[in-house]
Amino acid sequence: MGKKGKAKNTVNKAKHTKLLNQKKNKLKKEESLRKKRLKEIIRQSKNENSPTSL
């Protein structure tokens, strides 16, 4: 026979999934910000290091 009443672990599973998704989103955001900063630094260094004409 099946269980009666509320499912046991659904609330905890939902919270756990929510927290894991927040963590994944945070890591993705930090990674994209890091890439943007690095690209900007590289672009600036290329502009500084390349002389226009000598």
Image (spheres, rainbow, N blue to C red):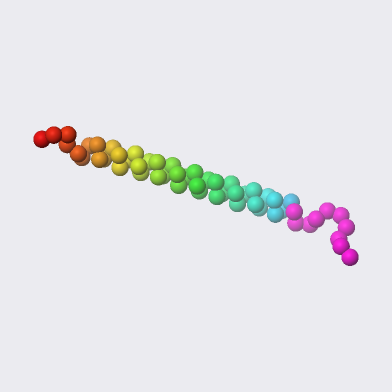
Up-down relation of residue 8 to residue 34 (above or below)? below
Question: At 70% from the left edge and 51% from the top edge, which residue is drawn?
Answer: 14
Question: At 56% from the left edge and 49% from the top edge, which residue is drawn?
Answer: 23
In magenta stretch: residue 9? yes
In magenta stretch: residue 26? no
Number of numbered callouts drawn: 0
Question: At 64% from the left edge and 48% from the top edge, which residue is drawn?
Answer: 18
Which residue sits furthest left?
A: 54
Left or right side of 3 for 41: left
Question: At 13% from the left edge and 34% from the top edge, which residue is drawn?
Answer: 53
The C terminus, quarter of image: top left
The N terminus, quarter of image: bottom right
Q: In the rendering, at what x and y percent does residue 9 appear?
A: 75, 56
Q: In the rendering, at what x and y percent does residue 5 appear?
A: 86, 55
Question: What's the magenta bit mostly, secondary-structure-wise?
Answer: loop
Q: In the rendering, at what x and y percent does residue 13 appear?
A: 70, 54
Q: Which residues are magenta?
A: 1-10
Left or right side of 36 for 43: left
Up-down relation of residue 8 to residue 45 (above or below)? below
Say which quarter of the image contains residue 7.
bottom right
Which residue sits furthest front?
A: 53
Left or right side of 47 for 3: right
Q: In the rendering, at what x and y percent does residue 6 appear?
A: 83, 53
